[in-house]
Amino acid sequence: MRRVILSIVGTVAGLVALLSFKSHLPSVPSASAATSGSAGTSSSAGSPSSSASASSSAASSSSGTVPGEFPQGSLAGQLATGETAVNGKVATTAYGPVQIQLIMRNRKIVKVAVLRQPQNTIRDIQIGEFAFPKLISETLTAQDAKVDAVSGASYTSAGYIQSLQSAVDNGG
Amino acid sequence: MGTVVSFDVPAFAADAVGRAVRWLHWVDATFSTYRDDSDVSRYGRGAASLAECAPELTEVLDACSAVGAASGGYFTTTPGGRFDPSGYVKGWAIERAAAMLTAAGSAEHSVNGGGDVQCVGDRGPGQLWRIGIADPLRPGTLALVVTGRDFAVATSGVAERGSHIIDPHTGRPATELASVTVVGSGLTLTDAYATAAFAMGSGARDWVESLDGYEAFAITARRTEWQTSGFRAYLPR
C-alpha cells in the first residue's frame, strides 16, 4: 500500500498543487468498465478524484500502441474495443489551460492525447511541439519499463503533469 | 519554470509529506533566482549580506566551494556569470525532504525532483527501486534502467531548449556529452557531481572513477556510451 503524492514547486509559473493518488503511475488501475455513450466529457475544474470522465468505446480503427504518436484532440470517438478514454481536469498554467486525455486498456495507458494546450506565444509553441511529445512518450515508456521514476534532464511541464495526474485519478 | 516533485511513501507517512512539501516551498522562496525578493537574488545583487540571509545560504555556499574544489572548478555558483547556486540546491533540498520522511518513521520511500531521485530503503520487501535513465538523443525512450536500494540517481544533460550547463572554464555551454548520470548514496553530492561531470565532458569518466562511492554512465553527443567500472553493480541482473 503506497501513496504517491505529487507536488509542484513553482517559480515563474507559481503553480502550487498537491494531489495524491493510489499507486505508481505505471500500475494505474484502468477506468472501471466502459459504460457506454457520452463521448469526450469535458471535465472542467473540480477535485481530481471527482469529475466524471470515462467515455467509452465507440468504433473501430486505429488501436495500436504507438509511442511516438501524439494525437491532438479527443480520441474518444475512435476507440478500439476495450479502450477507455479518461480526461484529466483542465490545469491552469501561466501559459494557458492544459488538458490531457488518457486512453486505457487492460489497466494500461496505451495513448495520451492533448486536449488543450497553450497556443499563443512562441514559447507556447515550443512547449507544445517539444515538451509535450517528450512528456507523453516518457509517460508511456515509464509504464512499459516498469520503472519507479525516470532520471533525465528536467523538462517538466507542470500543466501536463497536473492534468495527467487528475486523469490517472479519474481512471482509478 | 517550476519543478515537479513526487513522493513515493508508505501510507502511514503521508502526513510527513506535507512537512517535506512546506520545506521545498521554503527552499524555493529562499533560493529561487526567479524571485527578486529571495535571499539568493538579494545576495546576488548585493542588496543583502550573508548575515542578513537565511543561515542555510551560508551552508550552501560552503558546500558549493567544496564541490568546486573537488571538481577542479567545474562546479561553480556563477555558471552564467550571475550568482546561481541552483546546481547544488535542488539535490540538497530533495535529499533533505527524503530525510524528513525517514525521521517520520518511513524506512522505504523515494523523492523525485524533476528527474533527480533519492531512494531510501527498498521499494518493497525484496524489491529494488527501478529508475529509468532517459535517452537524451531518442526522446521518449530509456537508455537503460538502474536498480538499487538506499541510493540516489541524478542526470545532467541537454534540456528541452538546448544546452544549459556552462563550462566555467570556457564560459560556453558544454557540448561533449548528451547526458551523464551519476549514482551515489545521497542526492546532494550525486546531483552536484552530475552537473560538474557534464561540464567536464569526456574527462568526467576518470574523475568519477576517482571518487569513492560514485559511479557514472554517459551518452556522448556522438551517440557513444561509457560507464565507470563499478556502474554495472546498478544494472538489473
Image (tube, rainbow, N blue to C red):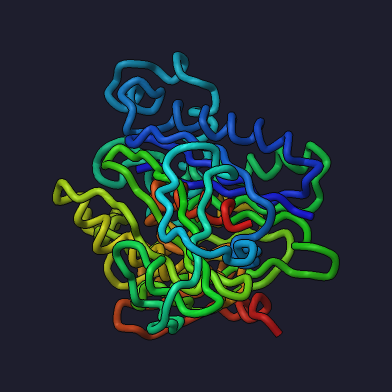
Q: Is residue A24 visible?
A: yes
The correct choice, above or below, for B75 with respect to B233 in the image is: above
In the image, A94 versus B109, the foreground residue is A94
Q: Is residue B54 left or right of residue B8?
A: left
Q: How many marks?
A: 0
Q: Given the current orientation, which residue lies at the most extreme front position?
A: A37
Residue A49 image offset from top left, x and y in percent: 59, 45
Residue B85 image offset from top left, x and y in percent: 40, 39
x 45%, y 68%: residue: A138
The correct choice, above or below, for A34 with respect to A80 in the image is: above
Q: Is residue B32 left or right of residue A6?
A: left
Residue A116 image offset from top left, x and y in percent: 31, 52
In the image, A42 versus B200, the foreground residue is A42
Q: Is residue B206 visible?
A: no
The correct choice, above or below, for A86 with respect to B138 in the image is: above
Residue B122 sits in quarter: bottom right
x 32%, y 33%: residue: B34
x 64%, y 56%: residue: A172
x 78%, y 46%: residue: B11
Q: Is residue A60 left or right of residue B191?
A: left
The correct choice, above or below, for B180 with respect to B59 in the image is: below
Location of the N terminus of chain A (image quadrant): bottom right
Residue B161 image offset from top left, x and y in percent: 25, 58
